Image (spheres, rainbow, N blue to C red):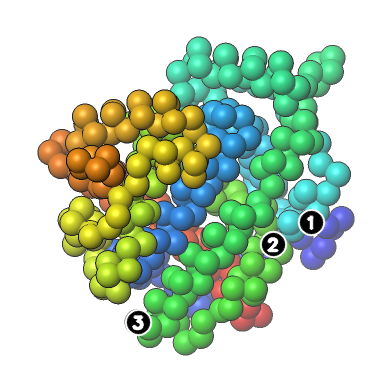
Amino acid sequence: MFILGFFMIKSLPSISSQVDEKIIYKTIEKNFSKLAPYYYSLISNWLIRAYKHYHDIDKFIIIIYLINKDLIFLRRNGLIIDYDTFYKDKTVEIEKINITDISKDLNIPKESVRRKVLELEKKGVIKKTGKKIFVDRSAFYAAQAVDTLKDLTLLLHKFNKLLKKTKVEEIVIETNEISASIKKNFSFCWYQFYKFLFIFTNRWREQVQDLETFCVGILAMLNASENKTFRVKDLNIKKYQKSVMSADNKGLNAMSISEITNIPRPTVVRKLKYLIDNDYLSINEKKLITVNIRGKAFKASTNLQNKNMVNLSNFIFRLFNQINIINHH
């Protein structure tokens, strides 16, 4: 039922027509080496784009947190709006900016949130008119899902292929159909994406101090996952975590990481030092960086990775079944 570009969420289909969340988790867990390049690309590309806008990933996350209020409102009211409607002539009005809530929900210290919000106000990204607060349209379009939509589509398509291979699904939905389905159900899908993203970034921020450090680290992981000899192997998540450290890859250096991320080289060097000192990465005599997680770091990051897999499977469960419903009705 369409209402001014909105439509009501249909009642959920019977369980039999859905792919079970446990099956999704097992598929990810057993075939992690096949999904890893798409998964790490989605995350690292998003972080790189986030940094590019304000040279501070957390500032971008704060903006998204405020935009997400719109998605929460639609979700609570049982409404879904499509991609074009969501971005059309958009100015996001915010009821209020609650520093305490942002700090608690995003796991960022209160003073940091206050400082970042003030800096965003100075830049005109957040505007105050009387009692009204707005997120500037340019910031809204900076957060527009274009490349992330492509990365997410590729991840879901690859996952669908794995379901077909394991005979859970009979058909493979093509990338253009997946993309069109996400756009049609945009507010639902992006609410789920941000929910996953906030949990994921909160965990890693706490683990490695800040998201710029994590961004530098995940590039080394992505570099290993894209190694040709490594990609052909069928590895579950446990074997993957061990094998990724012995992957015969070329490694990255501080300059190449700086060029990919736009993070200044001295900052990259500082972040690399932290990751090497804390047993996440190794550096060889040629100054090349590779993944080498050991000791406490291995235990902590494996635990964190396993938690993230539960959230990833929940996220894919919700999106994949929504897309499946559309393409089968």
Q: CA distance from mark 1 to mark 2?
A: 8 Å
Q: What residue does disc 1 label?
A: 84
Locate residue 173, reporting x and y percent. 56, 79
Q: Regarding mark 2 in the picture, which secondary structure is present there? A: helix
Q: Which mark is residue 166?
A: 3
Q: Are marks 2 and 3 in contact (CB under 8 Å)?
A: no
Q: What residue does disc 2 label?
A: 183
Q: Are marks 1 and 2 in contact (CB under 8 Å)?
A: yes
- Horizontal side, residue 299 vs residue 93: left or right: left
Q: Nearer the viewer, residue 181 or 179?
A: 179
Q: Regarding mark 1 in the picture, which secondary structure is present there? A: helix
Q: What type is the residue that disc 1 sits on?
A: Asp
Label count reads 3
Q: Please tell me how crowded label 2 is: few (under 14), some (14-19), or many (20+) other residues with Cα within 10 Å.
A: many
Q: Which mark is residue 13?
A: none
Q: What type is the residue that disc 2 sits on?
A: Lys
Work out which quarter of the rendered image holds the C terminus and state it.
bottom right
Q: What type is the residue that disc 3 sits on?
A: Thr
Sequence order check, earlier mark of 2 and 3: 3
Sequence order check, earlier mark of 3 and 1: 1
Q: Which residue is pictured at 53% across the width and 32% down the height? A: 57
Q: Which residue is pictured at 38% across the width and 65% down the height? A: 35
Residue 5 lies in what quarter of the image? bottom right
Work out which quarter of the rendered image holds the N terminus and state it.
bottom right
